[in-house]
Structure formats: C-alpha cells, structure tokens
Image (cartoon, rainbow, N blue to C red):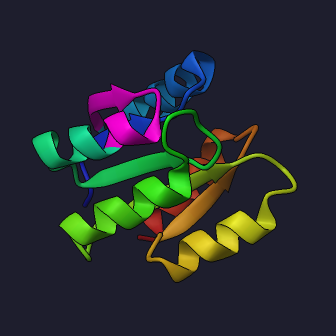
C-alpha cells in the first residue's frame, strides 16, 4: 500500500484539497511543491511512495517533471492531475510512465479509485 505522498501543484487550494483527501484515507503527505522543478527536487530528497503531479505549472510543467522523476526512478508511482480538456497531455504522461490521472475538480471517490488502482 502506498503511504507517503508528495503533492505537486501550483494551486494552493488544490494542494489543500488533495492533502485533506489523502490524509483522511491513511496517506502521510510528506511534501508539497508549487512547480515542477521543486517537485523533482522534493522527489529526489523525500523518495515518496506516490506523487500527484499537476500538468500545467510555472518554472517546469508536469510532463517535463514526470520525465525527470522517471529518470530518477522508472518505477515511480506518479498520478497526473489535469484540468478538463487536457487529454493530449494526459495521454503523453501515460506514455512516459504515469500510473493514472485525476481530472480537476476531483471528488474523493475518484481520487481513491485511481490511487487504489496503482
């Protein structure tokens, strides 16, 4: 079971929502980042079991961050977070090794369904 999570999203509100859902369901949120570059650095530093990674972020976008995380660990459990209408990016992320995706705005049952499927 995945237990330690890193949340990477430039939206403070989205990070708070995900953190609440994850903690409520037995995850320990061990880190947060508000851009892809910081997310990659935190991944390297914290070695989480799970990463939720937004696609659209400043400094380094989620696809680029995903590629960097996969260079560090090909088996990383990364779930992409996307807004409606970003299907191409989601497909690309799955091709690069993401284990699943969540569409904003998310509902708790959808988050759990994706995470339990990893």
Q: Residue furthest bottom?
A: 95
Q: Is residue 38 above or below residue 20?
A: below
> Can residue 25 be seen here?
no
Q: Is residue 42 above or below residue 47?
A: above
Horizontal side of residue 37 vs 4, given as left or right: right
Residue 1 or residue 102, whichever sits in front: 102
Q: Residue at x 42, y 30 (%)?
A: 24
- Residue 94 location (% of width, % of height): 56, 76
Q: Is residue 79 above or below residue 104?
A: below
- Residue 118 location (% of width, % of height): 41, 70
Horizontal side of residue 37 vs 90, given as left or right: left
- Residue 44 location (% of width, % of height): 16, 48
**Residue 25 figure quarter:** top left
Magenta stretch holds residue 75:
no
**Residue 107 figure quarter:** top right
> Can residue 31 be seen here?
yes
Q: Quadrant of the N terminus?
A: bottom left
Q: Which residues are magenta?
A: 28-39
Q: Residue at x 54, y 67 (%)?
A: 100
Q: Residue at x 50, y 35 (%)?
A: 59
> Exactly how many numbered labels are in the figure?
0
- Residue 48 location (% of width, % of height): 21, 48
Q: Residue furthest front?
A: 59
Horizontal side of residue 104 vs 110, given as left or right: right
Q: Residue at x 51, y 20 (%)?
A: 16
Q: Residue furthest right?
A: 85
């Amino acid at each position: 079971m995945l237990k330690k999570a890193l949340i990477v999203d430039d939206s403070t509100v989205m990070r708070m929502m995900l953190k609440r859902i994850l903690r409520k369901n037995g995850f320990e949120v061990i880190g947060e980042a508000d851009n892809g570059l910081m997310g990659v650095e935190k991944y390297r530093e914290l070695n989480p079991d799970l990463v939720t990674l937004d696609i659209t972020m400043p400094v380094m976008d989620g696809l680029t961050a995903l590629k960097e995380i996969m260079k560090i660990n090909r088996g990383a459990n990364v779930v992409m977070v996307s807004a409606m209408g970003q299907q191409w990016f989601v497909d690309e992320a799955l091709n690069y090794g993401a284990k699943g995706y969540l569409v904003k705005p998310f509902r708790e049952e959808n988050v759990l369904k994706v995470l339990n499927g990893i």
